[in-house]
Amino acid sequence: MLPLSRTDVPLGLHGKHDNALIYVRYFARRYLVLGVTGLVLFFLLLRILYVGRDVRPSPISDGNPSSRWPGRRLPPLYGQYHQYEHQLPQHHWDAPSHESEPKFFWIPGHSRGSGWGNIFQEVLLNAYLSHKANRAFVFYNYTWNDDGSDYSDYNGKPIPSRIPLSALIRGPIVGAPWPAGDPAPLAISEEYWHHVCGAKRRVIPRAEVHDHLPSWYVSDITKGWLDKLSTVDDQCVEAGSDGGPPYNWVTFGEKDAMTDVWPDFARSPVLTHLAWSPLVELGFDNNREVFAPTTVLEPPLSSIPATAPSAERYSMLPGLLVLHIRRGDYEGHCAHLARWSSSYLAFNALQGLPDRFAPPPGGQLGREHPGERADLHGALFPERAADRAQGGGGRARGGGAGAEPGACVCDDERRGRVGRGAQGGAEGHGRVDERGEQQGPGAELGAEVFIGNGWSSLTGNIVLMRQANGFRPESTRFW
Ligand SMILES: *[C@@H]1O[C@H](CO)[C@@H](O)[C@H](O)[C@H]1NC(C)=O
């Protein structure tokens, strides 16, 4: 199972280029073995979390998933997480009146049917806006398809139509208390919102806010909504779905869209107290020995109290290099990006990050610039891996001196050659991956050096959290 010599390493990962060899030589053999094992564990999770975008789900109408996908094991639906959300103490299901409860803010037009990277960045900003407005954030399922089905078809495979957010993340964003001293109201679930607010919603049409915005930067959108929300006193306020959610792809694709808001957003407890779910952390603990071995007295990640700030929880894993290689649908996406002179996504263009991408001058919107396609191709595909991995990016904060980096590669495309040994004690907790293996995410947040893809929202979420957690900007790079 583990590669025993250099020739056993699945070099397809790096393409058939000479660069692959340079890259391979870079790592001491020990780390190579650990790293390659880490990577296959790792990207399986990413596969299910980032199932791609722009692919419309086909609804399941026959009501019998096992006849629809004969012989396939159906993925879990995470019912116990849904139950946990239902039972949050701020949900007073049986109260005769809800008048003494806080004010709520619900965004029914939130995105659906996209990969987790896209959904997650929007969830973060929606929660940030609600917190700023001093209204309880109404959190919702990660929804692939809301036709009421349990399963959807993704490229011939069954995937859950909805995943409770608490199966993926943890913290005030999904109803946990805010840090001590923060009087903000606790987030509630969408079901509870319908229960309390069904008949007494006040809808603010999106156009009433967005028609007057000076830009689609996050700071302007946030201010527009906060100004508007300050004029209404209703308990149940809903953002109109006309024109989509407050923050959409226009904002996320704009490289300067985060600049003004970043200092405040980075301090928001939405980010400082964000964590992966217990399930995800268990996956990390089960697998970490292969890519970031523990020292004797190091407690498992999942045993750290839930209230610990994110920066403490995901402290640096010295010597670990994590690479995110986004593939699959990127060939077509590359042409699209070149046509629109795209630069890095907003979350990948935060202040201080050393790598920038400037489209070659002279391009016209809507028409592909040949130079840009070539440049983009270099950046979107891992041929550059060798150079960047060797250049490193310097040491992240503290420690790690002299350690040779281990490697952990997340690759969205390739299916892993992972064994069945990784399930550990996971059975009671449900599963993250359709085949039942537990994965090891979390590594990217703590990696001493991370190299990602500037056009990927999955990379973007990692970059955002690393920056918020105080990692040295030089330790976060792009191809
Ligand atoms: C969220 O997903 C769960 C299944 O995990 C489902 O029972 C529930 O109805 C969904 N909530 C909404 C509001 O659709």
Image (spheres, rainbow, N blue to C red):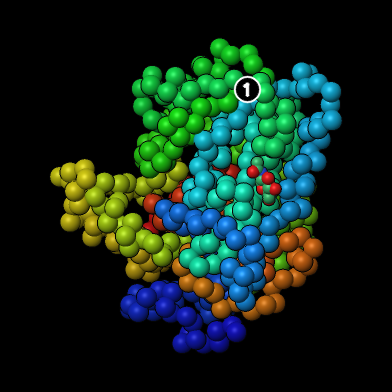
Residue 235, compared with residue 3, is above or below; it is above
> What residue is at 55 percent from the left and 51 percent from the top?
144
Q: Residue 330 or 151: which is nearer the viewer?
A: 151
Q: How many marks?
A: 1
Q: Nearer the viewer, residue 50 or 402?
A: 50
Residue 91 picture quarter: top right
Q: Residue at x 67, y 23 (%)?
A: 199
The answer to whether residue 450 is left or right of residue 251 is right
Above-or-below relation of 101 to 400: above
Callout 1 environment at 10 Å: few (<14), some (14 to 19), or many (20+)?
some
Q: Is residue 406 above or below residue 312?
A: below
Query: Which residue ends up furthest to the front in the rendered image?
Result: 62
Image coords of residue 315 (percent x, y): 64, 52
Residue 35: percent from the left, percent from the top?
55, 72
Residue drawn 56% across the image and 12% down it:
231
Residue that numbered label 1 is attached to: 201
Residue 460 in view here: yes
Q: Secondary structure at mark 1?
A: loop
Q: For residue 422, which quarter of the picture?
A: bottom right
Residue 282: quarter of image: bottom right
Q: Depth check: give the residue in front, 383 or 432.
A: 432
Q: Is mark 1 within 8 Å of ligand 1?
A: no
Residue at 26% over, 46% down:
340
Q: Quadrant of the N terminus?
A: bottom right
Whether residue 287 is visible, yes or no, is: no
Q: Which quadrant would the C terminus be assigned to in this image? A: bottom left
Q: Looking at the picture, how far across and down is residue 127, in whole percent? A: 59, 34
In-image side of 219 versus 64 (left or right): left
Q: Nearer the viewer, residue 184 or 196?
A: 196
Amino acid carrying mark 1 in the image: Arg
